[in-house]
Image (tube, helix red, strand yellow):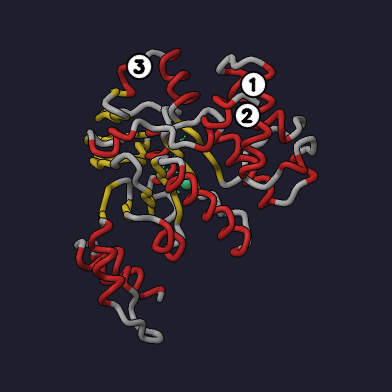
Amino acid sequence: MSSTSRSSLNNAPADPALATQAPAIRAEQLCRYYRMGETLIRAVDGVTLEVRAGEFVALLGSSGSGKSSVLNLIAGLDRPTSGSVMVHERDLAQLSREELARYRLHTVGMVFQSFNLIASMTLAENVELPMRFAEVNRGKRDGLAREALERVGLQARMSHRPSELSGGEQQRAALARALINRPQLLLADEPTGNLDSHTGTEIMNMVREFNQQLGMTVVMVTHERALAERYAQRLIFLADGKLVGDVDPEAMKELASAYTPVPGGVGPLTIAMLMANTVQIAEQHLCSA
Ligand code: ADP
Ligand code: MG
């Protein structure tokens, strides 16, 4: 393996200047409506938000609140009905199909609840697939796929097929695949949704490592508040396609230091949500606590 390929996965990929520059992601009055016969479903309904480079943001909300729709728009898998998504100052709506495909290939890594590995391929083949699309040559692909699988502790399982692996191992392979083209954004849609809590924690620790050591900006969809509180620096709440709360890192830190747990009492997140005027969500939280 060449020294270039090794350093490519171990060093922070992003331009360090990005951390202080324009936001990594900026959505402005973002809307995505679906027409189902006579009904118009406002899956995303005027969302404006910014995510800074290197941030770890959790997107929270109940089922059907529009989380996956927002994530898919940021991923360039879908186009807005109106409004815009800018990623690193590029308006995704202005990109041609080819440019959008390149954007998905080079800028974005995605992981899903259901892993989405190709069943007929070995782990190594799954992981190197994005590099085949990116026309990386064979020798380099092998080295990088091995390195990515080592990074997630699956070096011994390279020639296994997904069905021979546990859920946690499959998600680790999916993370290796998401990492392979050194994307600046990691978008995760309920990445621990199909895993037990121990395995879920393992996956989350890896996501955090990618964020902290590789400098990847992370947007993670989840409906698990505890997970979001534990790992994300910022929590964004959606309800009915609208942004109803945005709790920033400073508020989280202050609350964490001021908060003394009371058995059966309200948690720091509840207080944070009240502070962020997300009364509706806070009420739900209190009722379900
Ligand atoms: P979440 O991820 O928060 O559960 P989604 O973004 O998947 O929510 O969905 C938001 C709303 O949009 C839901 O009412 C869902 O049924 C609807 N929706 C999502 N995708 C489509 C689609 N392709 N066609 C029609 N309706 C959709
Ligand atoms: Mg979803």
Q: Is residue 264 visible?
A: yes
Label 1 near label 2: C-beta < 8 Å?
A: yes
Q: Disc 3 marks which residue?
A: 95
Residue 178 screen position, x and y as percent? 55, 35
Q: Nearer the viewer, mark 1 or mark 3?
A: 1
Q: Return the disc, 2 or 3, that comes first in the chain's sequence.
A: 3
Name the residue type under label 3. Leu
Q: Which mark is residue 144?
A: 2
| Secondary structure category for the residue under label 3 | loop
- Mark pair 2, 3: CA separation: 29 Å
Which quadrant would residue 30 be assigned to in this image? top left
Q: Which residue is mark 1?
A: 140
Location of the C terminus (image quadrant): bottom left
Q: CA distance from mark 1 to mark 3?
A: 29 Å
Q: Which mark is residue 98?
A: none
Q: Quadrant of residue 12?
A: top left
